[in-house]
């Protein structure tokens, strides 16, 4: 996945240390929409590029028409919870519905949450014998990369502390043999990190993830919606609305 961004020569690349004010994020006005059937080739390279984009303020949206590899795509978007606003699983949704949803989310002027760098443990299986293997990854630490924004009504987005205060772990239920989910990370994690506060206890982050071993046999193929005429019309409308917003 190679994308050429405006002012990309000013992007921070591979940087996991510097904290940016939202106003100073070079890519804060850039929106990238990925249409995919879910398969992924070179997931680490794709994750690295998406991470660099998000840490420079770029907004990423994924429309997954195949429903595969949700664990990868939600990590690529930096999601923490079972709800991931910038991710649309469109396997059984009519293109008109998900394109309407996509447009409304893109043109929203709501304040944006901070972009966080997180350190998660590798997934480990549950110890209790069961027909369903539950894999758990635990949040160890985090820091802020891009601070939250303030919208026109003076509403502020959530800080990393606010986003992660009740997050302890995320889990995947595996129904197939060979299920081996991966935790993706941009680079070696820096030593100086915000440690989880004492308030970070309680609710587990049971992220809705893909089941099975899709990631280990991934082959990415990006595609536009199948219902071509209506989908193309909505994409034209989307481009027009984005031109108005910008």
Image: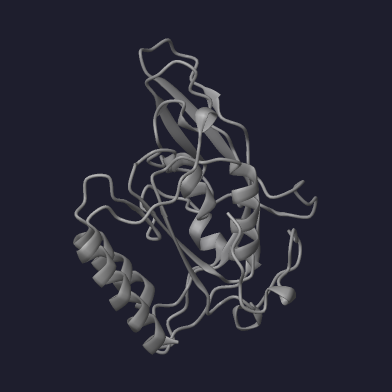
Q: Nearer the viewer, residue 125 or 242?
A: 242
Which quadrant of the structure image shows residue 145?
A: bottom right
Q: Position of residue 162 (x, y in %)?
A: 50, 62
Residue drawn at the location 53% of the way across and 75% of the way down = 30
Q: Position of residue 19 (x, y in %)?
A: 71, 70
Q: Nearer the viewer, residue 3 or 58?
A: 3
Which quadrant of the structure image shows residue 101?
A: bottom left
Above or below residue 26? Residue 12 is above
Visible in this render: residue 108? no
Visible in this render: residue 107? yes
Residue drawn at the location 46% of the way across and 48% of the way down = 74
Horizontal relation, residue 136 to residue 96: left or right: right
Q: Residue furthest front?
A: 229
Residue drawn at the location 67% of the way across and 79% of the way down = 7
Quadrant for the C terminus in the image? bottom left
Q: Position of residue 181 (x, y in %)?
A: 53, 31
Q: Nearer the viewer, residue 53 or 115?
A: 53
Which quadrant of the structure image shows residue 26?
A: bottom right
Quadrant for the N terminus in the image? bottom right
Horizontal relation, residue 145 to residue 29: left or right: right
Count of numbered marks: 0
Q: Position of residue 123 (x, y in %)?
A: 56, 30
Q: How did the renderer colour the structure? A: one colour
């Amino acid at each position: 996945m190679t994308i050429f961004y405006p002012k990309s020569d000013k992007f921070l690349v591979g940087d996991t240390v510097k904290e940016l004010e939202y106003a100073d994020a070079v890519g804060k006005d850039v929106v990238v929409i990925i249409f995919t059937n879910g398969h992924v080739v070179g997931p680490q390279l794709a994750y690295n590029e998406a991470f660099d984009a998000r840490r420079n303020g770029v907004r990423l949206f994924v429309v997954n028409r195949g429903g595969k590899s949700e664990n990868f795509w939600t990590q690529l978007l930096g999601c923490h919870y079972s709800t991931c606003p910038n991710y649309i699983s469109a396997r059984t949704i009519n293109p008109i519905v998900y394109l309407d949803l996509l447009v409304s989310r893109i043109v929203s002027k709501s304040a944006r949450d901070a972009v966080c760098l997180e350190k998660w443990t590798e997934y480990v299986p549950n110890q209790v014998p069961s027909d369903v293997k539950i894999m758990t990854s635990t949040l160890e630490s985090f820091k802020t990369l891009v601070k939250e924004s303030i919208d026109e009504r003076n509403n502020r987005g959530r800080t990393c502390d606010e986003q992660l205060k009740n997050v302890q772990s995320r889990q995947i239920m595996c129904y197939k043999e060979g299920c081996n989910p991966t935790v993706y990370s941009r680079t070696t994690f820096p030593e100086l990190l915000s440690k989880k506060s004492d308030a970070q206890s309680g609710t587990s982050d049971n992220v809705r993830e893909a089941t099975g071993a899709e990631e280990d046999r991934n082959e990415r193929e990006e595609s536009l919606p199948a219902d071509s005429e209506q989908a193309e019309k909505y994409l034209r409308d989307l481009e027009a609305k984005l031109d108005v917003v910008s």
